[in-house]
Amino acid sequence: MSLHHAILGMLNYKPMSGYDFKAIFDESINFFWSAKLSQIYRELGSLESRGLVSSIIEPQTGKPDKKIYHITDEGRAIFRDWMNKFPSVLRAPIREEFSIRVFFGSALQKEELEYQLGKFIKEGREELESLAAVEKIIEVFSREIGKPEERFFWGLVLKRGRMITEASVRWAEESLVELSGARSKERKRNASNRR
Amino acid sequence: MSLHHAILGMLNYKPMSGYDFKAIFDESINFFWSAKLSQIYRELGSLESRGLVSSIIEPQTGKPDKKIYHITDEGRAIFRDWMNKFPSVLRAPIREEFSIRVFFGSALQKEELEYQLGKFIKEGREELESLAAVEKIIEVFSREIGKPEERFFWGLVLKRGRMITEASVRWAEESLVELSGARSKERKRNASNRR
DNA sequence: GAATTCATGTAACTTGTTACATGATTTA
DNA sequence: TAAATCATGTAACAAGTTACATGAATTC
């Protein structure tokens, strides 16, 4: 329901090839939407067959030819329509595998879950560090596509990623304390039972 | 990659029908994973054909018969294997449509984006209110399936949902201020240009 | 009398993933 | 000389959505 809108949105900035799109995608949209090159090429083909984009071959020397896609007027209209109706956030489909696993946490030993939470915290902190570098990437890309005014919106989304990741890390830290607390309480109980 | 694990996890608590699963699912896992009844029935069929669950028909009077599914030893083994390897969080596929739309926010009028952020905040606050009621639902379900010890883990996940939603609402509130701030600055600029 | 609940599903479709293929050029 | 980069894709598969069908009992 959405990758082809992301493609239209990018082509709305500037014409580019599937490969170019993937390069920009990986350092921006990829933080909140994922896609493989194979899907990108297929979507581009389907968008072209529906007349929402058109392509021209750009020959290159020493490198494979490029197929540069342009958004058509019809594509732009479809994209604007899509942008004008945000669906209700509460009805958006959600996929959060980590939560499913914690939900079924009783199937694990306490130590195993503690390990997974620890890994989660570590990865979350790494993510926050790499997000700090995205600020610069945003500057580079917005200049590259000749749209410095996009920085504001990309920055908003970056901030959302940071705030959600911070909240997740905080949650995992507190959960770890709760889990370990439960364990030490249990130990105490066991110790007093033994007396 | 995951709904059938959620089904196995639930059947690991207690045997139930597809319809029962959906009822519990909608008030719990649904907050972090979505699924339609049609998919649930299909997954149950495929799990049965692979020998991970087995079913018996429970006749009812005045209501349609129920097909009660039980997890098999093999199903339990598969579920435990899955629980024991959490994938890296950073590599998990993400799908966040709202962020895509904000990313392409320049395609909208400022007022339109402000409206969408306002709606987001309103819905987020409603979500937080309804999450407050989930505490009770957790109690009911954990007693219903005869597993009061699950409350702890379900509570952890609930807390995660709350913290992330709170962060999202805070983000939207701050974004709205930034957007409006930008607009009033622009107005001032326009006003001084007019002088 | 209409809508909702209970309970099962099938079929067609869309979206996303994995694995494979090609082939020149550049970097380690 | 092996691996990565550039650049295109196809085919098979897995997962999820939408639309449809059935039919009794209950609630509005």
Image (cartoon, coloured by chain):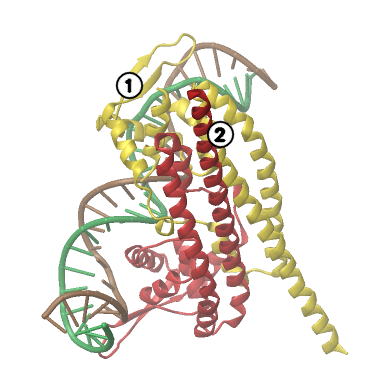
Chain colours: A red, B yellow, C green, D brown
Q: In the picture shown, does residue B90 fall above or below A108? A: below
Residue C2, position as x, y percentages in the image: 63, 25
Q: Amino acid at mark 2?
A: Glu
Seen at 51% across and 48% down, the residue is: A93
Residue at left 38%, top 43%?
B2
Estimate the x, y position of residue B155 in percent, counting from the top left: 57, 37
What chain letter is assigned to the residue under label 1?
B
Residue A97 appearing in the image: no
- Dot 2 falls on a residue whose secondary structure is loop
Cα distance between the residues tagged 2 and 1: 24 Å
Residue B168 visible, this orientation: yes
Q: Give the secondary structure at mark 1.
A: strand
Residue B144 at x, y percent in the picture: 53, 21
Q: Mark 2 near mark 1, Cβ–Cβ under 8 Å? A: no
Q: Residues within 10 Å of mark 1 (few under 14, many from 20)?
A: some
Q: What chain does mark 2 sit on?
A: B
Q: Residue furthest top?
A: B61
Q: Which residue is the site of mark 2?
A: B27
Number of marks: 2
Q: Earlier in the sequence, mark 2 or mark 1?
A: 2
Vertical comparison of B59 with B180: above or below: above
Q: Which residue is mark 1?
A: B55
Tell which of A7 and B139 is nearer to you.
B139
The disc label shown at residue A15, or none: none
Residue B48 lies, with reference to residue D4, above or below; the image says: above
D11 or B151, which lies in front? B151
